[in-house]
Amino acid sequence: QVQLVESGGGSVQSGGSLRLSCATSRYTASTYCMAWFRQAPGKEREGVAAIAPDGSASYADSVKGRFTITQDNAKNTLYLQMNSLKPEDTAMYFCAARRGQRLYYYNADEFRVSRYNYWGQGTQVTVSS
């Protein structure tokens, strides 16, 4: 079992930055792919960024160049640095984990919600214009 706890959400103005954190209950770096998803009211959950044990990462087109996913193996913590935030980034952000060594080639495959077995409770991000 892997337990995930997100933190770092909040309210910022458009153009601002936030860093989300996800603390994991066990060492996941070598055997789990980790990801951030988000869900806005009335919308489906969507993948934002994912990272594999080797450090390779994938990003949704909507956040590419603005968001960065990293992990600190010593602290068992996953991060999402979000810069140049826009109102459309407003959502509940979730940390997720799945067993695996590599990311799927296509984002549509990687960011399939059903692939991820473990989820955090979410942290709210609100961006005002």
Image (cartoon, rainbow, N blue to C red):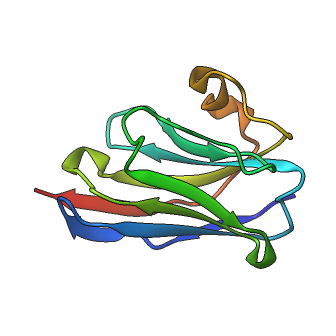
As drawn, the residue found furthest toward the left would be: 129
Frontmost residue, 96 versus 54:
54
Query: In the picture shown, does residue 119 fall above or below 78?
Result: above
Residue 102 occupies which quadrant of the picture? Answer: top right
* Residue drawn 37% across the image and 68% down it: 18
* Residue drawn 80% across the image and 71% down it: 25
As drawn, the residue found furthest toward the bottom would be: 75
Q: Position of residue 53 (x, y in %)?
A: 81, 50
Residue 114 occupies which quadrant of the picture? Answer: top right
Quadrant for the C terminus in the image: bottom left
Question: Relative to residue 97, is residue 63 drawn left or right?
Answer: left
Question: Relative to residue 2, is residue 114 drawn left or right?
Answer: left
Question: Relative to residue 29, is residue 43 drawn left or right?
Answer: left
* Residue drawn 24% across the image and 66% down it: 16
Q: Position of residue 76 (x, y in %)?
A: 76, 72
Frontmost residue, 12 versus 104:
104
Q: Position of residue 44 (x, y in %)?
A: 43, 32
Q: Position of residue 74 (x, y in %)?
A: 80, 77
* Residue drawn 42% across the image and 40% down it: 64
Quadrant for the N terminus in the image: bottom right
